[in-house]
Image (cartoon, rainbow, N blue to C red):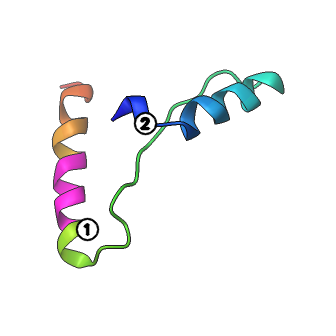
Amino acid sequence: MAGYDMLVPYLRQILGFIGITDIDTIRAEAQSFGSAMEQVAVVARTVHAAPQVGP
């Protein structure tokens, strides 16, 4: 999916132009599909973030 993402590189370029270079991105997908998809997104986000969190 990274190949289809045009917004993050664009924003990094624009923000880098004005001197903001330390950028972390947080993806918030499937926000308009109802509460069932919201629960799936929360679980997926938790599973994805778990390995990045220290002990």
Q: Amino acid at mark 2?
A: Tyr
Residue 16: within the magenta?
A: no
Residue furthest to the front: 4
- Residue 42 image position (x, y, % from top left): 23, 57
Is 30 situated left or right of 21 in this image? left
Q: In the depicted view, which residue is nearer to us: 3 or 39?
A: 3
- Residue 50 image position (x, y, % from top left): 19, 35
12 w.r.t. 49: above or below:
above
Which residue corresponds to the image point at 36% horizontal and 55% vertical from the top-left? 29
Label 1: which secondary element:
helix
Indicate which disc residue 3 carries: none
Indicate which disc residue 38 carries: 1
Dominant SS of magenta comes to: helix
**Magenta region:** 39-45
Q: Which residue is mark 2?
A: 4
**Image quarter (top left, top right, bottom left or bottom right) of the N terminus:** top left
29 w.r.t. 6: above or below:
below
Which residue corresponds to the image point at 65% horizontal and 33% vertical from the top-left? 10
Disc 1/disc 2 C-alpha distance (Å): 22 Å
Label 2: which secondary element:
helix
Quadrant of res 14: top right
**Image quarter (top left, top right, bottom left or bottom right) of the C terminus:** top left
Which residue corresponds to the image point at 21% horizontal and 37% vertical from the top-left? 48
Q: Amino acid at mark 1?
A: Glu
